[in-house]
C-alpha cells in the first residue's frame, strides 16, 4: 500500500479480463501517463464551455483540478471521476448576459445552483435514490436533456456561426471526421482536435484572405456600439467590422506564470432562476455516470450516489466562488477508463494536479481565449446537437410511450419554448425565457396532467434506481 493505493499485480500489465480498481494502481510512471490522458480527454469541453459562457477558461481549467480532488475526497475514493465544466448552464448563462449580466452575476447564479445540487445529494444520501426517480421519470429527464441542447440552437445561429460561416462549416466537417473516422482515444478527443484544426485554418485564412467582416468574437452584443436588442433581451445585433480571425496579441503580453483572473460572485434572483433548470440535468448526468462506473468496476455504488451528487454541488460552489465554471462528472473520462480498464483514482489525482499547473500559466489561458468565433460555431453546433439527441436516447432506452398525451403534450410544448427561445414576462423587470421556461412547463405540466389523468392512464411506471438517467454530454 502506497499513498492509499495497492499495487495491482506487478504494476506493469493487466491479464485478460482484469481491471485496476479505484484503490489500486500500476507503476507511478504509468499512472502519470494515464493521468495525462485524462487531462487530454476532459480538456476540449472544459475550456470550450467557459469561452462560450464568457468566463475565464484558465480559471475553469485550474479549478477543475481543485474540484476533482474535492470530489474524490467526498466520495472517499470510491467513485473515480473527473469534474470538468458543465454544458448544462450554457443556455441560462447566455440569457443572463443577453439581459446585461456580467461574470459576477453569472457565477453568483451558478454558485446557488451548486448549493441546491449539494442539498439534493444530501437528500439522496439519507432518503435513498428512489426519491429522484419519482420526480424525474425518464420522459421528464429526457425532455430536459433535449431542451438544454436544442435550446442553445440560437447561440450557434445568432452568435458564433455568423462570425465566420465558412470557417464554422470547415471546423464542423473536420470535427465530424475526427469523431466518426478515428477510433479509440483520438476519437474521444475529436472535439479538441477539431478545435485545433479550426484554429489553424483561421490563422491560414487571415494570411490568404485577409480580415473577416463580422462582430468581434467575444464582444458583448448588448453593450456594443450600435447594438439593438429584442424586448426580452434574448436577441442582440451589433455592427460588424473588419478584424483578424486570430489575434494573439494578448498571448504575447501574458506572462508564463501567475494566478488567473479570479473574481467574486454577485447574486441576483432573476439570474438564479434562469440557471436553476440545470439542476435537473446535473442530477441525471451524475446518476448515469456513477451507475456506469459501478457496472464497469463490478462494485456497488448506490451507497455513494448521494455523496457523488453532493460532491459535484460542493465543487461547483467552490469553483464559482472564485470565478470558475460549473462542474460535472465527465463521460469523456469514463470512456477513457472503459478503454484502458484502469479505474484507479490515483490517475485522477494526477490529472487534477496537471490541470492546476495549467491554470497557473496565463499565457496558456490567453491562447485559449483567442479561439476564433467561427471555430466555436463549428464546435458548438455539434456539442449542442449531441446533447439534445441524448435526451431522445433516454426516451428510446426507457421505451417512453408518446402515444400517451400526458407524455407528448407537456414535453412537446416545453421543447418548443426552449428552442424559440420564447420569453414570458412575469413582471416588468423579470421574465422566464427559453430553457428555464421550457423546463418548468415540462416538469410541472407532466406531473399535473399525470395526476389529473389518474395513475391508470397517466405516465409510465418508473422502476429501478437507474431508470431515466443517461449521460448528458458536454
Image (spheres, helix red, strand yellow):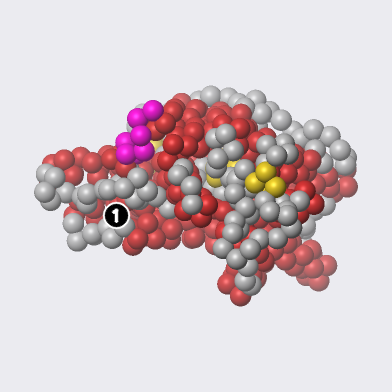
Which residue is nearer to you in this view: 465 or 303?
303
Would residue 258 be visible to someone looking at this image? yes
The reply, left or right, for residue 121 in relation to residue 193 is left
Which residue is nearer to you in this view: 104 or 411?
411
At 73% from the left and 39% from the top, the residue drawn is 2
Which residue is nearer to you in this view: 14 or 155?
14
Q: In this view, which residue lies farthest toward the bottom?
A: 181
The reply, left or right, for residue 288 in relation to residue 155 is left
Could you say where residue 377 lies in the image, as x and y percent from the top left? 60, 59
Quadrant assignment for the N terminus: top right
Which residue is nearer to you in this view: 180 or 208?
180
At 67% from the left and 41% from the top, the residue drawn is 5
Q: Which residues are magenta?
A: 126-132
Would residue 168 be visible to someone looking at this image? no
Vertically, is 259 above or below 43? above
Could you say where residue 315 lies in the image, as x and y percent from the top left? 58, 33
Asked if the magenta segment contains residue 131, the reply would be: yes
Could you say where residue 446 lies in the image, as x and y percent from the top left? 24, 45
The reply, left or right, for residue 107 in relation to residue 235 is right
Asked if the magenta segment contains residue 248, the reply would be: no
Q: Which residue is mark 1?
A: 412
The reply, left or right, for residue 45 in relation to residue 204 is left
Q: Quadrant of residue 189?
A: bottom right
Q: Main secondary structure of the magenta part?
A: helix
Amino acid at each position: 500500500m502506497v499513498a492509499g493505493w495497492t499495487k495491482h499485480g506487478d504494476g506493469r500489465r493487466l491479464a485478460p479480463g482484469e481491471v485496476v480498481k479505484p484503490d489500486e494502481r500500476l507503476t507511478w510512471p504509468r499512472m502519470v501517463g494515464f493521468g495525462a490522458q485524462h487531462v487530454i480527454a476532459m480538456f476540449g469541453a472544459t475550456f470550450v464551455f467557459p469561452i462560450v459562457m464568457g468566463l475565464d477558461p484558465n480559471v475553469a481549467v485550474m479549478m477543475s483540478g481543485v474540484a476533482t480532488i474535492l470530489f474524490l475526497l467526498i466520495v472517499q475514493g470510491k467513485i473515480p471521476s473527473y469534474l470538468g465544466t458543465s454544458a448544462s448552464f450554457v443556455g441560462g448563462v447566455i440569457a443572463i448576459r443577453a439581459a446585461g449580466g456580467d461574470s459576477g452575476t453569472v457565477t453568483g447564479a451558478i454558485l446557488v445552483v451548486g448549493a441546491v445540487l449539494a442539498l439534493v445529494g444530501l437528500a439522496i444520501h439519507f432518503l435513498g435514490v428512489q426519491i429522484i426517480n419519482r420526480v424525474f421519470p425518464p420522459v421528464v429527464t429526457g425532455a430536459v436533456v433535449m431542451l438544454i441542447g436544442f435550446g442553445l440552437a440560437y447561440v450557434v445561429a445568432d452568435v458564433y456561426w455568423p462570425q465566420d460561416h465558412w470557417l464554422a462549416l470547415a471546423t464542423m466537417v473536420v470535427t465530424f471526421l475526427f469523431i466518426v473516422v478515428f477510433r479509440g482515444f483520438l476519437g474521444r478527443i475529436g472535439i479538441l482536435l477539431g478545435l485545433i484544426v479550426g484554429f489553424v485554418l483561421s490563422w491560414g485564412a487571415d494570411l490568404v484572405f485577409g480580415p473577416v467582416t463580422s462582430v468581434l468574437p467575444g464582444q458583448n452584443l448588448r453593450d456594443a456600439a450600435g447594438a439593438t436588442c429584442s424586448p426580452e433581451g434574448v436577441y442582440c445585433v451589433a455592427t460588424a467590422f473588419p478584424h483578424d480571425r486570430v489575434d494573439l496579441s494578448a498571448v504575447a503580453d501574458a506572462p508564463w506564470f501567475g494566478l488567473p483572473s479570479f473574481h467574486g460572485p454577485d447574486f441576483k434572483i432573476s439570474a438564479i432562476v434562469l440557471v436553476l433548470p440545470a439542476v435537473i440535468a446535473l442530477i441525471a448526468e451524475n446518476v448515469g455516470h456513477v451507475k456506469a462506473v459501478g457496472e464497469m468496476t463490478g462494485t456497488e455504488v448506490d451507497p455513494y450516489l448521494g455523496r457523488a451528487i453532493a460532491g459535484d454541488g460542493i465543487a461547483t460552489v467552490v469553483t464559482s466562488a472564485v470565478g470558475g465554471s460549473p462542474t460535472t462528472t465527465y463521460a469523456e473520462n469514463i470512456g477513457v477508463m472503459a478503454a484502458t480498464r484502469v479505474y484507479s483514482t490515483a490517475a485522477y489525482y494526477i490529472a487534477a494536479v496537471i490541470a492546476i499547473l495549467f491554470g497557473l500559466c496565463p499565457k496558456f489561458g490567453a491562447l485559449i481565449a483567442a479561439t476564433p468565433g467561427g471555430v466555436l460555431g463549428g464546435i458548438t453546433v455539434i456539442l449542442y446537437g449531441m446533447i439534445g439527441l441524448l435526451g431522445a436516447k433516454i426516451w428510446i432506452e426507457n421505451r417512453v410511450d408518446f402515444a400517451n398525451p400526458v407524455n407528448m403534450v407537456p414535453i412537446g410544448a416545453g421543447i418548443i419554448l426552449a428552442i424559440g427561445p420564447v420569453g414570458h414576462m412575469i413582471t416588468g423587470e423579470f421574465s422566464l425565457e427559453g430553457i428555464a421556461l421550457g423546463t418548468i412547463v415540462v416538469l410541472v405540466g407532466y406531473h399535473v396532467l399525470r395526476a389529473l389523468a389518474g395513475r391508470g392512464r397517466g405516465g409510465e411506471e418508473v422502476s429501478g434506481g437507474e431508470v431515466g438517467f443517461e449521460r448528458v454530454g458536454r
